[in-house]
Image (tube, rainbow, N blue to C red):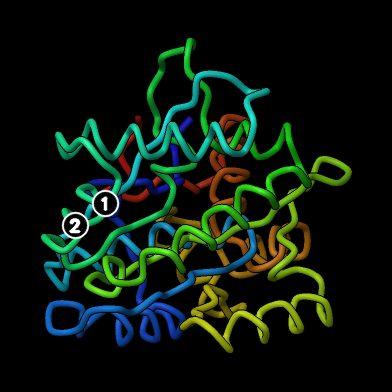
Amino acid sequence: MTKFKVTCTEDNEVFVVTSAFSKLYKKFKDFKNQRGRIILIIGSPGTGKSSNIYHALNILDIKEYDVELKLSGIKISPQKVFEEFISTLKRDFNTKTKEESYNEFSKFDTILFADKLLESGDLNKNRIELSEWLRYNRFKSIILYLIMIKEFLMHLNYLNKVNLVFHLTWTFIFKNKKYDILSDFSLLSILLTGFLKVFFEVVEIKYTELETIEIVKTHFEGVNDTQIKHYIRKYGNRPRYILEAIDNNLITLKATHSNIKSAEPVCKQR
C-alpha cells in the first residue's frame, strides 16, 4: 500500500498549496534572519501537518535539525525519557553536556520536533518509538511535558538563539478513530489553543472541503467530487485518511472497472 504519511522533505513529491500552508510559510520565511521564535503546528490527525512543515522548509531552503529519539523501554519514567533525549543530542553533536548540545542548536535555522521525534522509522525492534511510549503512558506523559517546559525556562539563554518548531499533538483513540484534543473538541480545543497562543505562535493545519477535494485529485486520477465527498463524510477533511482509504479500495474498484488510478508521482514508499 502506498504510504501518504510524510516524515521528510524527500517524501513531498505531491503537494497542494492551501490557505493553511500559506500561513505556515509566512511564519517560516524569516527564520534565517530571526531567532528566539517558538511555533506550534497543530491539527487533526490525517491533515498532513508534517507534509506542510517539510514543504515549507524545503522551498525556503531552511537548515533544520530534525530531532530523532528511540527509547530503551515503554515503561520507563518521564525523567528517563528526558535523559535519553539528552543522550541522543550528545551523541548527535559529539558533546559532553546538555548545555554544549543546546549551544549547537544555534548552527541551524530551526530545530524541528516533528514526526522523526515521535516515529523515527527505525525498524530496530529493541528500541521504542516516543509515540508508543506516549500512548502507553497516557496522562503520565503530562509529566514529560512539564519537565520539558521547566528545562526550556532554565535555559532560555541558549534557546533564545534558535527557532523551535513543534509538531504538537495530543491524541487518543476512541472507537478505532484517532482524535486530537487540540483540534477536534470545539470549545475545549478553542480554549486550549487560545491559552497556547498567549505564549507561542500557533498555526493550525486544516482544510476546506474544496481544498480537500483538490488534494485527493492530485494523488488519484479519475476520482470525482461525489466520490471524494463520500469519504469526507466518513473521515472529515483529513486527506491522508481519505487517500489511504481509496488506496486500500483500489483492488475492489478495479474489479468493477473503475477508472481511478494513482497519479504520478506519488509519495515515496518507505
Q: Which of 264/101 is in front?
A: 101
Give the image quarter of residue 68: top left
Give the image quarter of residue 238: bottom right
CB within 8 Å, label 2 to label 1: yes
Which dot marks residue 99?
1
Does residue 253 appear in the picture of this structure?
Answer: no
Give the image quarter of residue 85: top left
Q: Residue furthest top?
A: 126
SS of the residue at dot 1?
helix
The residue at the point 61 percent across, 79 percent down is 196
Measuring from the top left, give residue 101's x and y in whole percent. 23, 47
The C terminus: image quadrant: top left
Q: Residues within 10 Å of mark 1 (few under 14, many from 20)?
A: few
Residue type indicated by callout 2:
Asn
Measuring from the top left, give residue 29's x and y in whole percent. 21, 82
Measuring from the top left, give residue 80's x and y in whole percent. 54, 31
The residue at the point 39 percent across, 42 percent down is 116
Q: Which residue is mark 2?
A: 103
Picture layout, residue 71 above or below residue 6: above
The residue at the point 67 percent across, 83 percent down is 195
* Alpha carbon separation for disc pair 2 and 1: 6 Å
Picture layout, residue 228 above or below residue 90: below
Residue type indicated by callout 1:
Glu
- Total number of numbered labels? 2
Picture layout, residue 97 above or below residue 170: above
Which dot marks residue 63?
none
Does residue 75 appear in the picture of this structure?
Answer: yes
SS of the residue at dot 2?
helix
The residue at the point 56 percent across, 64 percent down is 224
